[in-house]
Amino acid sequence: MRKKSLPLKLQMMLFTSGLICLTLLVTGLLIGYNQASETKEALADKAALSASHFARMPIVPDALEKGKADERLRAIAREIRESNNLQYIVLMDMEGIRLMHPVADRIGEHFVGGDVDAVFEGQRYTSEAVGTLGPSMRAFEPVYNQDGMQIGAISVGISTEVINQAVWDSVKITILGTVVSLVLGLVGSYFLARRLKKTLFDLEPQEIAYMMEEREVMLNSVSEGVIAIHTDYQIILANPSAEALLERAGYHGDIIGRKIIDVWPELSTEVLLNDEQAVYDKSVHFGNLEMITNSVYFKVDKNDVGAIITFRDRNELDAVMKKLSGVESYAHTLRMQTHEFMNKLHIIGAMVYTESYEELAEYVDSLSRIYQRETGIISAHIDDVAIAGYLLTKLERLEQLQIDVDIQGENKWPSLSDPIAVDRWITIIGNSLENAVEAMVGQEEKKITLVFDVLDGALFYEICDNGAGFDVGELPSILEKGYSTKGLNRGYGMTIMINAVKAGKGTYHIQSEIGAGVCLQIKMPYL
């Protein structure tokens, strides 16, 4: 039982949306991380620049030398802090004592944070620490007097909350773009899945796969050769029967991807892909075989796509027609027998109507003698009603053709319960008699000997004629090609008989010489 899967449209939407989500998530994380890093770096540069700018003001070294920041310096610091959204600007001496702070009560106290030591060694740097105003990013800048001696330091801080808000503002645009892209991707995936489903005739992948399996099974089971060619005359498909037929005709090698003119030149001149009319039952030679071909051109959206060509060995078709002709001949014989029987009934009716009873008695007596003679001979050797009746009609025809028939045999054929076995024997007897009649055409003396016997639990049948005969060495060629190369016209019937014998798991033996007739022996089990 096939496992039911999700519809193709839903699968494509889930797959596409999942891929888009993953891609956008990774991209968004990378962009967000990069923007966050750049924002923090920009703010750190801003703090460092503010600290450097403030440290180079002449008023700052003066305040450090006096040990006190006046109101003017505090006003400048307040203006810089507010305009640049800074948390604090602190001025300290070489002992780390604050000379200036946004909170007046903390002036005169030591700088807090544990990251101030390096600035007293003349280093410029930024760090993150927790001070009296909370966590912040801090820039440190040394302050020098006119003699180049360090006399203090500047620390400029930006609140971590301000940094986080700036990072969020920069990442927020990325998140918004990611969400919009995801929505657009989902809408696009929906329409893509819808268009693809329409292109696939609204079929699901498992349905298409099942149809492909069915197509392969059908192509492999067709006895006719099937070839599909593209508009550029390139073979794009060939079933096993086509490859086998082409190999029998003498072509060996791969045919898929080859030009039809390189594989089958005679056919390529007959196939015109711009012709919209189909061609049926056209005879085309290929090597030593004659093929019956059918060409059908097809289009997609009014555009030429290619053609499908089916073909079969003409000899095989002729063999089938020969078999059908044998059945038709059997039916015709039965109709003749029925017609003759009706004529006899009319004669008897006329004699009764004219009250010619003596003539009627003589006529019925003669019919009885003829019937007893013919049926007696047959019933003495064959107990099966169907086979005996068929043989009786064939013997009447042979009598009309002035052919002497001798029936022999020691053990009587039993009645057969299997209708298939009866059909096989009728096929064998009918074709063997037809072959014998054809072999004696034009001869003055025509003789056929039939032997019906039972040997070792198997039915034995033998037919010998005094016809033209043939070279037994040609038998394999006759059976393979379906016709006699010497013009005896007996190959089809022989092939049909041999196939019937093989189907019944029997054996056969043929003896013949040119001018000495043919003797065919068949032994086939019936139990």
Image (tube, rainbow, N blue to C red):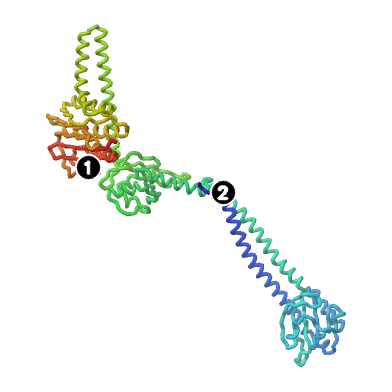
233 above or below 345? below
For mark 2, what is the residue?
A: 7
Left or right of 27 in this view: 129: right
343 above or below 35? above
User: Residue 461 falls in which quadrant of the image?
Assistant: top left
Measured from the top left, where is residue 434 in percent x and y? 22, 32
For mark 1, what is the residue?
A: 478
Left or right of 399 in this view: 62: right
Residue at image point 80% right, 79% down: 89
Residue kind at label 2, given as amino acid type: Pro
503 above or below 50? above
Measured from the top left, where is residue 520 in percent x and y? 19, 37
Q: Do the residues labelled 2 and 1 touch (CB within 8 Å)?
A: no
Left or right of 403 in this view: 267: right
* Residue most extreme to the front: 456
User: Residue 183 falls in which quadrant of the image?
Assistant: bottom right
> Element under label 1?
helix
Res 52 seen here: no
Measured from the top left, where is residue 180 in percent x and y? 66, 58
User: Residue 45 falls in which quadrant of the image?
Assistant: bottom right
